Amino acid sequence: MSLAVQIDQNGGPEVMKLVDVTVGEPGPGEIRIRHKAIGLNFIDVYQRGGLYPLPMPLKLGMEGSGVVEAVGEGVTHLKVGDRAAYASQPPGSYCEVRVMPAKCVCKLPDAISFETGAAMMLKGLTAQYLLKRTLPQGGLKAGDFVLFHAAAGGVGLIACQWAKALGLRLIGTAGSDAKCALALANGAEFCINYSTQDFQAKVKEITGGKGVKVVYDSVGKDTWDKSLDCLAPFGLMASFGNASGPVAPFAPGILGPKGSIYVTRQTLFSHITTRENTQAMADDLFEAVTSGKVKIHIEQTFPLAQIQDAHIALEARKTTGCTIITL
């Protein structure tokens, strides 16, 4: 048996309940993992609320770390007793023990704690595919400007550090002066408080009117229109989240007058469809963390029994860096 967080209908944090579930043996291509820590992400909110519809009843959570208890037929990259971490579908990480597909589960280096492993997989792999795989025409090189919204969040703080290591000039945005200071302390060259400043005007000022090569945007509705106007000609608008709500439909014809710009909507799970891709991206992330180029900031922890409080804090934008759920 295992305690797990389950919802029977979409709604607010109050729909999440702790239930007892039976955990069996892993089948072919699966493992059973006992969690040591669990990651909290905005995708969990989208699934709970119904923005990303899924069948009910639904167990939540996309990220965790722990110890492999059993291995199913055909799994060769993991063995019983291995320390492991993952960002993976289907949801279900908000629990003590689970059986899950092994494909996206990676052996966790001894130098990385379970807490850090749970905090960094989804957010760190997201930063990896954004900065390394989601690139404007001609790619990115040292000295290029990029705009990164929500720079003090879990993905944002990792991206600030990683971008600096790559020589990129990252302009961040955040909703308070304190969050801006945090982003600057973690490698952002500039950070704009979008609650008190016009970020579009500031970006144009910082770049001498040229704009940025790429905008990485997990905020969505509230930042979309001005973000398009921050781009240089042939720039890339990379949407990867909807923290303020989904982007309204728009006419593709507006992209031409704005400089023949590109638009893409990215998800991590498109990038980790194969075991090989998952491991390559994870190896890059592990190297960035163990080398010290990227520090994972765990700023909030909640016990599993207080999962409702964790969601309330996340949705109210009262969190910075990463949040983990403890067992």
Image (spheres, grey):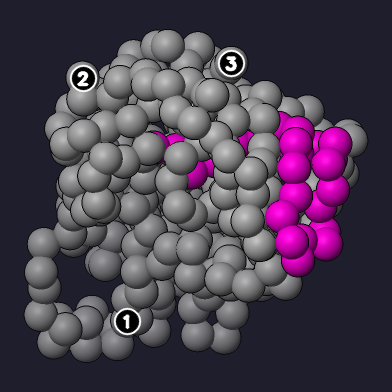
- Left or right? Give the position of 319 relative to 254: right
Return the disc, 2 or 1, that comes first in the chain's sequence: 2
For marks 3 and 2, give the CA distance. Answer: 20 Å
Query: CB of mark 3 within 8 Å of CB of mark 1?
Result: no
For marks 3 and 1, give the CA distance. Answer: 46 Å
- Which image quarter: residue 253? bottom left
Residue 184 % position (x, y): 56, 34
The relative height of residue 7 versus residue 100 in the rendered view (above or below) is above
Would you call the spot at circle 3 few (<14 residues within 10 Å), some (14-19), or many (20 or more)? some
- Report if residue 61 lies within the magenta region: yes
- Report if residue 165 lies within the magenta region: no
The relative height of residue 305 versus residue 222 in the rendered view (above or below) is above
Q: Secondary structure at mark 2?
A: helix
- Left or right? Give the position of 271 relative to 174: right
For marks 2 and 1, give the CA distance. Answer: 42 Å
Amino acid marked by disc 2: Glu
Amino acid marked by disc 3: Leu
Q: Which mark is residue 261?
A: 1
Viewer-side residue, 238 vs 191: 238
Foreground mark, 2 or 1, reads: 2
Return the disc, 3 or 1, that comes first in the chain's sequence: 1
Which residue is found at the position 39% from the left and 26% from the top? 5
Res. 50 visible in picture: yes
Q: Which residue is mark 2?
A: 14
Amino acid marked by disc 1: Ile
- Left or right? Give the position of 310 relative to 168: left
Q: Which mark is residue 209?
A: none
Q: Which mark is residue 327?
A: 3
Viewer-side residue, 315 vs 109: 109
- Point out the stretch of residues depicted in magenta: 60-84
